Image (cartoon, rainbow, N blue to C red):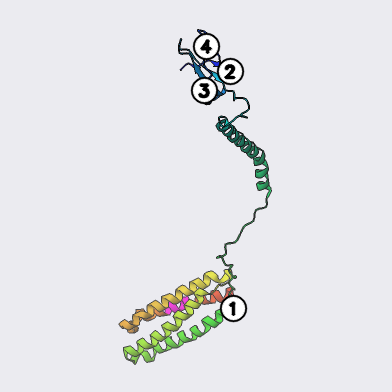
Amino acid sequence: MQSLPTEAKPLPACSQCGTALPPPSGSATFVYGVGAVGYQSCDTCGAKWRYLWQDPPGTGGGLNRLPFLLVGAVIVGLLVVAVFGVLRSPTKYKAEAEAPTTTSVPRNVTTTTPVATSGPADFQAIVDPLDGTRADLLTYLQGDAQSSPQYLVNQRVAAFVATANRAVDALKRSTWPAKASADIDKLVTMHEQFISDLDLIQYGQLYSTSFTEKLATDVAAIRTAENAARRDLGLQPVS
């Protein structure tokens, strides 16, 4: 749409046909890039134009210019904020980059106390009593158990198994020196194998030669692993 011609002020007569015009009435309209304008038209020739708005003398701008003043104030305010942000941002980022970083510890996180490493005395306290109890069981199985009722044999074996399980658990829970750890793990495995094989006694395997040999093999493996662990811990081997 073709824009209307703009005059510097209201015209007293039409510039096209010279017809006299009454004083303009109405309120101003804001046109982007032009400012506040009013409008005139000629009823004789149909010409239309706009003029730069001028407040009546003595009104001091009146209410007609208030919307434009508000719009201008908003625009100026936005420009000030934008300029302030541009000027402040480098300083802010620099301050944040130079500020020392601190790592906070969550309140619900507790520090752990290092676990003490078990030593030779701890090993002997666990293993020596078990060695004696195992030797007593083997003597029983090779002697009195041969002529004892099965339920009595089962009770004796169950008592040893309970003791052996406690000793094995103690070996597992303890923290051993790295040098002895592998051999103690092997000792635990050999004990668990011996305990598992003892379970077959309740099924009448005590009188089987192959079973007796199996128990002897288990005990020999236990002794080998135990002496290796003793050597690692600086203890004398046992026969």
Q: Quadrant of the N terminus?
A: top left
Mark 2 / mark 1, whichever is N-terminal: 2
The three-letter code of the residue at mark 2 reads Lys
Circle 1 SS class: helix
- Say which of marks 4 and 2 sits in front: 4
Mark 3 / mark 1, whichever is N-terminal: 3
The three-letter code of the residue at mark 4 reads Ala
Pick out the residue farthest to the top.
Answer: 17
Which residue is painted at 59% across and 23% down in the image? Answer: 54
- CB atoms at circles 3 and 1 under 8 Å apart? no
Mark 1, residues whose alpha carbon is within 10 Å: few (<14), some, or many (≥20)? some
Which residue is painted at 61% across and 36% down in the image? Answer: 77
Residue under label 2, please give it. Answer: 9
How far apart are the two marked residues, 3 and 2, measured between alpha carbons?
13 Å
How far apart are the two marked residues, 3 and 4, measured between alpha carbons?
15 Å
Residue under label 1, please give it. Answer: 120
Q: Is residue 10 above or below residue 173?
A: above
- Residue 175: x %, y % from top left: 55, 72
Mark 3 / mark 4, whichever is N-terminal: 4
Mark 3 / mark 2, whichever is N-terminal: 2
Q: Residue 79 magenta-drawn?
A: no
- Say which of marks 2 and 1 sits in front: 2
How far apart are the two marked residues, 3 and 1, measured between alpha carbons?
112 Å
Residue under label 3, please give it. Answer: 25
